[in-house]
Structures are given as C-alpha cells and as structure tokens.
Image (cartoon, coloured by chain):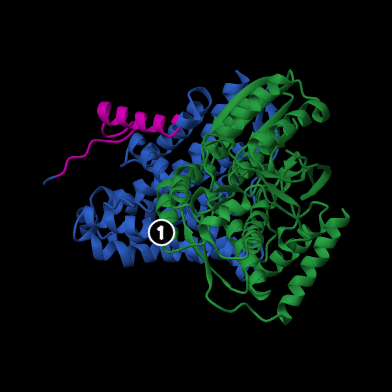
Chain colours: A green, B blue
Amino acid sequence: MRTGWIAALALTASIGAARAQAPAQGEPIKLIGVVELSGAGATAGTNWRNGIDLAVEHVNAKGGILGRPIQILHYDTQTNPGTTRAAVQRAIDEGTYAVLGPVFSGPIAASMQIAQRAEVAQLVGGEAAGLTKQGNAFLFRTSLSQADAMPKLASYLKEQVKAASVAVVWVNNDFGKGGRDVMIPELQKRGIKVAADVSTEQGQADFAADVIKVKNSGAEAVFVYLNEEESARFLRAAKQAGLDKPLIGETTLLGAKVIELAGEAANGVRGHVGLSVDAPVPAFQTFGKAYEAKFGVKPDHNGLKGYMAVHAIKAATQRMGKVDRKGLAAALHGATVTPTDEPGILIETTWDKNGDIDRESFLAEVQNGRQVITQTLPKLGR
Amino acid sequence: MTEFLQLVLAGLATGAIYALAAIGFTLVWQTSQTINFAQGEFVMLPAILVLALVRFAGWPLPAAIAAAALLFVVIFGFGFKRIVVDPMIRHGVLPLAIATMALAILMREGAKDGFSAEAQAFPSLVPTGAVTLFGASLSLRDLSILAVACLAVLALHLFLGHTRTGRMMQATAQNPDVARILGVPVERMILLTFAINAALAVVASLLVSPIYLAKFSNGETIGLAAFIAAIVGGFNQVRGALVGGLLVGLVDNLSAAYVSASYRTAVPLALLVMVILLKPEGLLGRREERAV
C-alpha cells in the first residue's frame, strides 16, 4: 500500500510537473491504436482509446520517450475481425512502433498473426485464455488471462457465495466461450453443479428468454460472462424478471460503464476485477480523476489498460535505451515494471514469456451504484 | 408451464414493439407504395434525440420527450415525405427503396458521430418489478409494454374506422384516383400517414430503448424484425402487421429458449419463407392485383 501512495504521489507530481517541463522534441514515435470505436465493442474500445490518449498527453508533456514525442493515431475496427486485420496491416505499413489493440478477443485472434509476422509488439485488451497459448512472441496482454481469473472466481463461488449450483451465462464469441470453457471445469473441480449453461450472442439486445431460463434452472448463483453492453442489458432483464440469486462475474460485469448503463439493476452484483479506479490503489484514483476531468466520464478497466499499455512501451523502450521496433517485444518479455520505475504503470506489473500478465487483482461488489472493493488478491508470483 | 407462460408474455411484449414498427411499414405502403427501409432507424432515433436534449440542452426528461417527439414527427414525418418520398416516387418503387436505405445509413451514422457510438442508458417509462399470476412471475414492464402497444393500435384502429379523416385515409389507401374525384385531399392524407408512422416510431422507441439501451445500431435488429412481421402478417393490413409483430416476437423468444440463441434470428426468417411459400399475401393480408 505504501508503494501505491508513492506511485500516486509520483503520478500526481509528474502530471503537475509535466506542465512546467519542456515538451518532447525530435522525430515523433508513431503509435497506432486499432480499436473498437463502433459496433458491439464500442464501449470497451472508447475507454481503451481514451486511456491511450491520456497517456500520450502525459508522456509527451513529460518529455516523451527518450526525448521523442509520441504521435498517436486510432483506426476503428468496427468490432469486425476482417476490418481489424486490415487495420493492423495498415498500422504496420505506416510504421507504428507497436500496435495498441484491439480489445475484443475475437478480433485479436484474427489479427495477431499479422503483427507477429512483421515482428511488431501488439499490446491488447483481450482476456481469452487461448490468445497467449499459440507461441506468439509479440502479443502482450494488459489484463489478466481467463486462465488466471476463473479459478479465483470459482473459489469465490465455493467459499464465499457458498453456491452448490451455478447457472453459467456466456457470450458466444472468443472471449465468452474461452471463459466458459475454463470456468465450467473449475466449478466441477470444486463440486459445484452447473444448473444451466446458457449461450447468448454478441450484440444481443433482448435477454428476457435467457433470464427466464436461468431463473427456472434452480441455480443458487449465476455466473455472468458477457461483454459490457450485454452485461448491462442482462442485469436490467434480470431485475425486471425478479431474479434474486447472487449475480457473480468478472470485470465486464462490474465495470463503471456497466453500472452506468444498468443503473439500479447493477446493485448487489459481485465478482473479481482486474483493474478498477475504485480499488484501494491511490495511483488508480489519481488516474481516474485525470480521466474524468478530460473526458467527463468515469473510466472502466479498459481506460486503465490503455493508459498502462502506453507506459509499458515507454518503460521497456527506456530500458533498451533506444527506439527499436523489433527489440520492444524482447524487452517486455519477463519484464517487471514498478511504479517507482515508471509512475504511469500505476501498479507493479510483470509480463511472462507468453505475454501473460501478473499483478494484484480485486474482489468487488456494487453497492448504491458504486463499485466497492472488498478484498485485494495478491500477484500469482509465477 | 410457468416458464412457458413467462416466455410467451416476454415474446408478446417484444412482438408488440415490432408490431408498432411493422404498422408503420404497412401504413406508408398502403398510402404511397413506399417501403421504408429506414423504419428500424426511425425507432432508434427518437430515444437518441431525447438523450441529446437532456445532455446538451439540460432539459428535464418529460420536456425532452415532448420536444423530441414533436421534432421527430415534423422532420421524419412531414420532412421525410416532402424531401425524400415526393421527389423519388415518380421514378418508381425501387429508386425510392434505395433512397430509404441511404436515409437509414445517414440516420445511423449521424446518431453515431453526432451523439455517441456507445450504448446509453434510457430510463424506463413503465413500471418495473414482477407480479405473480397462475404461479408464474410476470414482468410488469412486459405487461405495460403490451398494454401501451395495444392501446396505440386500438387508438389507430378507432381513428381509421370511426373518424372522417380516418375514413378519408382509408379511401386514399384503397384507390387514390377515385378518392381524389370524391373530393378527398389525397396529398394531405398521405402526409398524415407519414406523421402517424413517425408518431408510432416514437412510441416504439420509448418502449424499446430501456431494454435494448439507446444505441445507433438498434435500428438494424428492429427494422429487420418489423419488416418480417409486416410481410408475415400482410403488408396491406394494419391488423396483419399487429399479428405479424406479435408472432415474430413470440417465435423469437421461444426459439431463444428452446432452440438456441444462435438461431433465434434464423427462426423468424424461416417463418417468413414458409408464409411466402404458402400464403404470399401474408396471414391476414388480401390479394392485390395490379396492372403492369
């Protein structure tokens, strides 16, 4: 916690000092975001882009990377895998130093080979477990993998919710199916019965039928694993139908945007969150205030991920001592970046040889329209 | 059984919203031979206008709803007729259909760039919670949506069948040349039809947006469902559109529960194909003969 305060002070000081410091000069380092700015992933993508833009503003104001400013561009993928592939190729052709995005796992899976072939580091927001199991040395997460998050949630359902049976509601895309495939064996391993296994569609608008199925399944708790907008629609439908079982989920069920969209229906929702501006990490809260001041809304975890992605690139480049597009991936593998090294990283973060991330995470509950952190979970220490 | 009852009610509530949009299809078709492929976007936009007035002008919700409804009826009722339909209709149905497709894109992208690409919360104007009936827990929202939609259709039915203006509109729909000879102000009746279509779209928008969340892309789902509903029920009958809407909503919900969520959009399409093969004029539609 002490290091958290030091990081917050450093971040606050650096944001303030940035104004007084000479801005970066020299040839810009080009970074291109390949982002879901429309389509089903617009909520996640907009947060990710805003986080990146805020980071670029802060980094440039503080002298850039090795004295060079960052030039940032974003291409809209429309949450479409084909458009994402084209956008990643375009970003590489235009000389991006690293590819920032996308956020959804399906478009990541469809486009990651392009960055891999070009030997360009790609920092993504996806959580699907399979992404980092394909031997791609250029792919780096900014959030915990499902393989790490789901066991924590299954244990939470067993030990704290004390549910003997659980209904699993998941979105039928790479993110949702990946989570479902990891979660169900974890539940069964702990003796929890899967009362209903409900598949839904990405972009689905009406969840009345799914909620009725869940309600009549007799499950003692419901595990909801949908993207942000669909999570909000599900919560609204659940409230309408009077579904009174504990609703448990991951970051995509408890995020700020979901709470805003679902309104009162989000109250009582519990689960595991990787990143949150409500977490007891002062640097997160400082970031949250800066984001809210600039964009007028509270950021969700994707805003934090975008912010940290840019600072991870900065930290790795400064360690190399040179701007080396091919060397960036090698510099990130096995790297641990602490807020003391780079205040913009906000919390100590480690990337392993597969590009998976390790850092503290949190258990949370939505109370009176606010996400309240109930417990901090330590790094896995792999 | 209770699950089935709950699913039927939820399906009918969704279907009632589709029906409001489908009725717009049939009204506009009957009076001006226009297929409005922007009908889904007509349902999407009023909610966005309401939120824009609340956010940018700081208006309270009731005032924003009233102003947005009025604005929408003027622009997308009267304006749509004058600016899009009148200049295009003389070139035939196909160019007009393409013009409405272009309008749909314009409305969609305009809402995205002018307001937001992200979904937005929209407050529910009907009661929330559930009541228990025959052992089944029924959503008050679904019951309210069904009631509001039925009231809107009943009001339209009474207006068309029991008022002088309504009968003139029917005469215009049946044979505009004869209606004109009989002194019916055909142009004004057609204009009124477009205004009613816009008003029904506003009602549908206010009902559906709390469920779907207000988003620029909502029109795609609603437009397709309403188009299927209008064809299934009968493109030339208002009551056909009502039945078609309810049926599509029902089939959609039951297939999501008992077949698969992946195929929920395919099942209404299968229903459409069956109706076209077995009863091309629609379930309640009447056969039309045209000179070519």
Query: Mark 1 sits on what residue?
Result: A90
Which quadrant of the structure image shows residue A23?
bottom right
Q: Is residue A164 left or right of residue B37?
A: right
Question: Which residue shows up at 35% across the image and 49% down it?
Answer: B27
In the foreground, A108 or A254:
A108
Identify whether A12 is placed above or below A144.
below
Q: Position of residue A301 (x, y in %)?
A: 68, 51
In the foreground, A72 or B171:
A72
Q: Is residue B122 visible?
A: no
Please state the extent of the stretch shown in magenta in the rendering: B263-290
Q: Is residue B99 left or right of residue A284?
A: left
SS type, badge 1: helix
| Residue at the limit of the structure toward the right, as seen here | A2
Question: Which residue shows up at 38% across the image and 66% down it?
Answer: B79
Q: Is residue A138 magenta?
A: no
In the foreground, A79 or B168:
A79
Which chain contains the residue that carries disc 1? Answer: A
Q: Is residue B283 magenta?
A: yes
Tell me the crowding category of disc 1: few under 14, some 14 to 19, or many 20 or more residues within 10 angstroms, Cα based: some
Q: Position of residue B284 (x, y in %)?
A: 34, 33
Q: Amino acid at mark 1?
A: Arg
| Residue at the limit of the structure toward the front, as seen here | A321
Q: Position of residue B209 (x, y in %)?
A: 56, 49
Q: Is residue B86 left or right of residue A226?
A: left
Which quadrant of the structure image shows residue A13?
bottom right
Identify whether A307 is placed above or below B145.
below
Question: Which residue shows up at 60% across the image and 39% down it?
Answer: A226
